[in-house]
Amino acid sequence: MRSKGRKESLSDSRDLDGSYDQLTDSVEDEFELSTVCHRPEGLEQLQEQTKFTRKELQVLYRGFKNECPSGIVNEENFKQIYSQFFPQGGECPSLSPCPWVPLCEAGSGEGGTPSHCCFPPDSSTYATFLFNAFDTDHDGSVSFEDFVSGLSIILRGTIDDRLNWAFNLYDLNKDGCITKEEMLDIMKSIYDMMGKYTYPAMREEAPREHVENFFQKMDRNKDGVVTIEEFLESCQKDENIMRSMQLFDNVI
């Protein structure tokens, strides 16, 4: 019975990457069973759990499997993969370093995100926060299911879905509220990711000022923390934040 279960799981994996070849069945079985630590759920089940099509899931799985042949990624691997997206810090033209930057800067005036990096960036801290947001069961690893579930919310979720995901990202200790210390850690990680030295020069107090602006806008009852209710209400009334929630609508 155990052998049959592994065989069925392997078939599900082939269904995802679309590479099943009956002629090489036995060879692939031996190789995959010796290298793969985790196999994703079946394609149909992942379609039901996410908002991706069959083809999109296959494309995503090929990329995930290429980067993570074992089927899971730990925090260190995640940091290495994520750092590849920001080799030039603030000059990276293809991706915003943080899809929620307008939320981090809510209510800010001067001293926005630096526009040009002249020192190698460090994305490791922000990558850790992002990893913890994807690792929903807190087992120290991100599987393909974890990855596509989070990605489905970011790319295809409703506005409320995306805002809830962003709140969870900022709520570092997952206690249901965002403190100034947590928000400051997030802001510092974003500036580190953009590069430590920038042009125009970033003022040292800029991250803390962003945090104060964030809380001035979000902390409605002035108790020093931002709850999910305050967060949702404030974000939904901010046009810039609402626009930012639509940035990735057509990414894939």
Image (tube, rainbow, N blue to C red):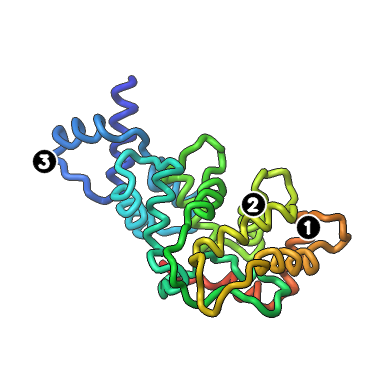
Please state the horizontal and vertical placement of residue 2, each as a whole percent of the image: 33, 21
Q: At 43% across and 41% down in the image, what residue appears?
A: 74
Tag 1–tag 3 contact (CB < 8 Å): no
Please state the horizontal and vertical placement of residue 87, each as a whole percent of the image: 38, 64
- Looking at the picture, tell me which residue is in the foreground, 131 or 232: 131
Q: Secondary structure at mark 1?
A: helix
Lower position in the chain sequence, tag 1 or tag 3: 3
Lower position in the chain sequence, tag 1 or tag 2: 2
Is 30 positioned to the left or the right of 240 in the image?
left
Residue type highlighted by circle 2: Asn
Mark 2, residue position: 168
Q: At 34% across and 59% down in the image, what residue appears?
A: 55
Q: Secondary structure at mark 2?
A: helix
Mark 3, residue position: 23
Q: At 70% across and 71% down in the image, what residue appears?
A: 106
Indicate which disc residue 229 carries: 1
Please state the horizontal and vertical placement of residue 85, each as a whole percent of the image: 40, 62
